[in-house]
Image (tube, helix red, strand yellow):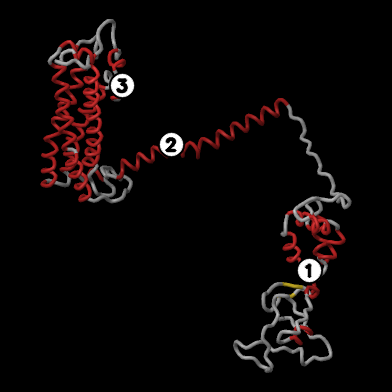
Amino acid sequence: MSFLLGCFGWRPSRMPRAEEKTTLVWLLTLKILMIIPVAIAAFSAKNTYTSIRKHEELQQSPPYDKHVLLSQLLVYIGTMSLFPWLFISCALVLVWKGPWLFLYGVVDLGLLVTICIGLSMEGNYLPSSVKSCSTSKVTTWQVVDNHPSFFVQAASYDPNPNPQQKCKTFVTTWSLGVVVAFFQAVLAYIGIFFDEREHSLLNPFRPLFYFVLALIGGPFLFHAHITPRLRFSISYALKSLRHLFGQHPLIFPRPAPYTPNHDKPIHTQNPRLHAILTIEHVALNVVSHMHYEDVIALSLACRSVREAVFPSRDLAFRVPKLRARCCVPVTKAPCAYCKKEICSECHVLVSAKGVPGARHVEKCLPYCRTCYFRDFSKRGRRGAGAARACRCARDEGGVQEERGG
């Protein structure tokens, strides 16, 4: 069956490769599981068909449906033929495989079409569920003129007339036929789309791929190609109408200039700190010996402090003032330990006489308050891993600044 791979230079798209063993396992499993349901549906359809064939009153149209006998006959023939075919096809699948699976699938499809046509005809004169077979609905179901309903007439031929039970029998038979038709459709699908080749038209993954493509492709194409054009057309139409009928000039209110109110207290989460930093010259004195990154960290304390340090309506004037008082740009140099750029005015003199190296800490001005020496070597040279030597002791006359710490 090489023609399934394309013709006249055309080749179907590539699909995942299937396995014949998997197809055989699915076919045999479903056929074995369907034996009992098909047998029940076949003999149930036989009883309903026989009860209608024996009584010509039920076949009259009007008052009843004109396809009553034909619908019951199709379901009866389809299910009764399917029952022995399950055993025959199981034996044939084990003997003849490969392209023969397509023939078995065509037979399954023919039986499926027969059953489905009969079920669709039965749906015209039967209720959709057993719940509809109540006493009040059975007597009034599709009544024409003064004739009794279909179920009342069918139950009148029984020794113990019970229209409600007769309705349940017909609906149950129809439901069994629907179940059999569903699994028969799966069998027909597996049998017809049997080819394991990737580019075959009968690859089992091809119908599923096209179904998903049809389900998602339409909305995707609409969203990708039609929606932008619709939005542009609507926007263009609205703008054209505005220009046609005229449009008032847009006037935006100007924000009021920032006027700090130092007299009126502001109740916030941190009123004391906020009240101090709201005064500009106090805030500038506070940050005069701080690094600019420390000022940013201070502003992150809370919302009120951030508004006091960096007022939203005065940023254009406040930020240059803070930068001018925080650091000296000319003397910025990276710390030898943490690589943070700090100017010469950002040092801190700390006195810690109770720890080793107190003389170094007292006389050296570290460029970073987090990079103090912890160990001091008295040797002139230091090897790998040794502590840096402190030169403070050699310069007793003044203060020796260490750029590294």
Camera-nearest label, 1 or 3: 3
Q: Is residue 88 left or right of residue 400?
A: left
- Circle 1 is placed at which residue position? 290
Q: Nearer the viewer, residue 51 or 245?
A: 51
Q: Give the mark nearest the N terminus, 1 or 2.
A: 2
At a point 62% along the width and 88% down the height, the residue shown is 386
Disc 2 to disc 3, C-alpha distance: 39 Å
- Circle 2 is placed at which residue position? 218
Q: Secondary structure at mark 2?
A: helix
The amino acid pointed to by label 1 is: Met
Q: Is residue 210 left or right of residue 60?
A: right
Q: Is residue 112 left or right of residue 236?
A: left
Q: Quadrant of residue 403?
A: bottom right
Q: Quadrant of the N terminus?
A: top left
Q: Nearer the viewer, residue 255 or 353?
A: 353
Tag 2–tag 3 contact (CB < 8 Å): no
At a point 58% along the width and 34% down the height, the residue shown is 231
At a point 78% along the width and 76% down the height, the residue shown is 348
Tag 1–tag 3 contact (CB < 8 Å): no
Most distant residue in the right direction: 263
Residue 108: x, y in percent? Answer: 19, 35
Most distant residue in the bottom direction: 379
Camera-nearest label, 2 or 3: 3
Residue 116 numbered mark, or none:
none
- Circle 3 is placed at which residue position? 132
Residue density around tag 3, few if under 14, some if 14–19, many if 20 or more, within 10 Å: some
Q: Give the mark nearest the N terminus, 2 or 3.
A: 3
Residue density around tag 2, few if under 14, some if 14–19, many if 20 or more, within 10 Å: few
Residue 59: x, y in percent? Answer: 19, 13
